[in-house]
Amino acid sequence: EAGVAQSPRYKIIEKRQSVAFWCNPISGHATLYWYQQILGQGPKLLIQFQNNGVVDDSQLPKDRFSAERLKGVDSTLKIQPAKLEDSAVYLCASSLGQPLHFGNGTRLTVT
Amino acid sequence: GENVEQHPSTLSVQEGDSAVIKCTYSDSASNYFPWYKQELGKRPQLIIDIRSNVGEKKDQRIAVTLNKTAKHFSLHITETQPEDSAVYFCAASNDMRFGAGTRLTVKP
């Protein structure tokens, strides 16, 4: 089966700019997750979708981060405006129950 | 949400020795406990998981044990090999929050 697809793989932006990441989950997976992984740390859950509804966004910095999954398939994660501390790998994962399947991530560098 | 703590943060062993990584969780309702391996620059990949109705699960050199009373679970790797060197993450249950990770180094 095709895995979780993410794009872009790398992105470099200046602070205060905006950026968007895209994720296409495994076909049929109802649950989609976005994680932020800062170098040397574990993945931090930002938001969890069940189809097109938000299950958990308690750790999403809502003043600058937003995410949507309008048709219950693809998802986008946006940061506006970016800060230096947003430099990280943004991982998308999907599941049909358990386990989670991760994409290769987008490495964001904010300068 | 669930709070998962993982120890140790780094672990160095000689090839052939065993390695044990422990995680504790806070939510007694958690019922699913996966372990992921992440090699440098790559995505996390599931290596083994266990559900709350089972106390132990083994897959070749890898095993996971679960103590629901104490709310902790452990990853055991026997006969370690250099290719086992990676960062290992645990997670707990439905909201899938991860531990901080353990960097395992297997010295040849």
Image (cartoon, coloured by chain):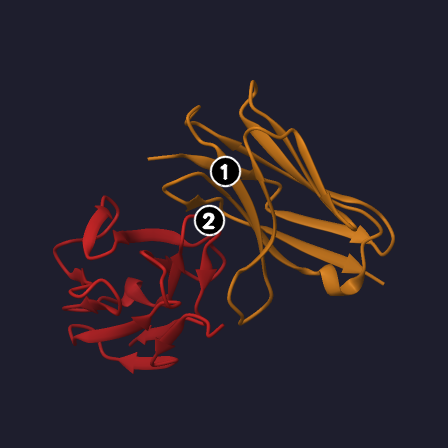
Chain colours: A red, B orange
- Let me know if residue A37 appears in the view: no
* Residue A4 position (above or below residue A32): below
Q: Please identify the residue farthest to the left as the structure is shown.
A: A63
- Residue situated in front as seen by the camera: A23 or B25: A23
For the residues bearing labels 1 and 2, Cβ distance under 8 angstroms? yes
Q: How many marks?
A: 2
Q: Quadrant of residue B108?
A: bottom right
Is label 1 in a helix, a strand or a loop? strand
Q: Residue at the location (49% across, 51% down)?
A: A99
* Residue B10 position (above or below residue B25): below
- Residue situated in front as seen by the camera: A94 or A43: A94
Residue type at numbered disc 2: Gln
Q: Quadrant of residue A9?
A: bottom left
Q: Mark 1 highlights which residue?
A: B32
**Mark 1 packing: few (<14 Cα in 10 Å), some, or many (20+)?**
some
Quadrant that contains the N terminus of chain B: top left
Q: Mark 2 highlights which residue?
A: A98
Q: Position of residue A75 (x, y in %)?
A: 24, 67
The span from disc 1 to disc 2 (Cα, nearest Å) is: 8 Å
Disc ID at residue A44: none
Q: Please, which chain is the residue tagged with disc 1 on?
A: B
Q: Please identify the residue farthest to the top as the structure is shown.
A: B69
Q: Please, which chain is the residue tagged with disc 2 on?
A: A
